[in-house]
Image (cartoon, helix red, strand yellow):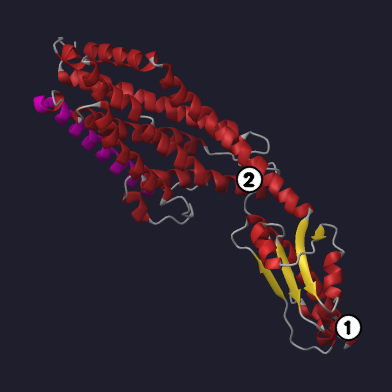
Amino acid sequence: MKNNAIKVVFKKEMIEIFRDKKTIIIGILIPLFLFPLISFILGKTINNSDKKIQQEVKITIQDKGNSKLSEYIKKQTNINIVNVDNPEESLKKGDIYLYLNIPEKFDANIQKNNDISIDIIFDNSSRDSLAALSIIQTYIDMYSKGVVSERLNNNGIDSQILKAFETKIKTIEDESEGDARLILSMILPLLLILYSITGTMPPAMDLGAGEKERGTLEPLLTTKVNRMSLLWGKFFAITVVGIMMSIAAIVGIELTMVQQNGILKMSNGGTVKLLPIAILFIIIVPILNNMIFGALGLALSIYARSFKEAQTYLSPLSVIGLIGCYSTMMIDPKNIKTIYFNIPIANSVCLLKEMIVGVINYHHILITFGWTAIYILVSLYWAKYMFSKESVIFRT
């Protein structure tokens, strides 16, 4: 009888939730298409920006002596020399990416082996300027090596004497896949945990405070359904909606992973191949977080006098989620300290980060799941406590 009552309440709540088309649009379609759209726009923007910088580096050179270095840089096919009256002002406006200040008698001092320096002025708040700096530094280093080689040759010394050994840089993963995996480890846990929090909020507010406002909670309590069956039916309905949002987010990210020129694939064609156990945990961890925040949201919602008051109570949950997610976003997935796996929300994010990069640490898994089980039990107990108090249910 009790199980049948839970099923009836669950079915009733699911019908109520999906009767509003906004739930489908906001809860499922947005997570499904939002990240692929963002990825496409960011990938397109970054690719176009990189190509623009590589093909045309807009710089200004202040060189009264018309040095050979200046001529060398001007000969590069992707360098565009822009003549401006006030280089610093033009740099601030973005008209140029950087400017070089080459001192007088630069070539003469080079010939005399005198110490000399040039100034490179760039804008460290501009991504284009930083990219241009890297390109110009490469050209200057090439020119510098040529000068050193000429000096040695003039003194009858083989320039190879400066090269003690050759360095070959190799990676343990495909270069493009490693880049994509790094980006995915930063973004995927963040989105999944945030969706597991925010996905439970609308149904939790509607099935608690919303029913109070509509006046449908009191008639429901007069039926044969006991309060625990009512609690479980509502809890399962909220959890299912949250799970659907998380699945929509996962599918959206999967679409992003195969998207050409997206942020996870870019122009180098990189993509990510996840281990089966990683895929399993990517599914399980958000579901467990859905259960935690579903129970918390329902408890707060039933306590609230109105839908507006429920929004006020539930808003801090998203803030807590943001703190937990963003505080661990930049942590290296392969060097996460154990302390992070004892922090709510942060432990789920860190565990997902490890799974994405292929780190399977059973100690961290046990700690995270142990704490998660405690959080679920505490949240459910609190929700049960709220539902058992007349002063809370009929609080208007």
Q: In this view of the protein, can residue 182 be seen by the observer?
A: yes
Describe residue 157's horizontal placement relative to residue 13 as left or right.
Answer: right
Q: In this view of the protein, can residue 265 be seen by the observer?
A: no
The amino acid type found where label 2 is placed reads Glu
Measure the alpha-carbon separation of dots 1 and 2. Answer: 43 Å
The amino acid type found where label 1 is placed reads Asn
Tell me the quarter of the image containing the N terminus: top left
**Whole-percent x, y for residue 112 in the image:** 83, 90
**Whole-percent x, y for residue 167 in the image:** 71, 67
In the image, residue 369 lies in the stretch drawn in magenta: yes
**Whole-percent x, y for residue 144 in the image:** 79, 75
Q: Nearer the viewer, residue 103 or 32?
A: 103
- From which residue to which does the magenta span run? 364-391
Which residue is identified by label 2?
177
Task: Determine the residue positioned at 22% across, 14% down.
Answer: 216
Q: Nearer the viewer, residue 127 or 278?
A: 127
Q: Residues within 10 Å of mark 2 (few under 14, many from 20)?
A: some
Which residue is identified by label 1?
153
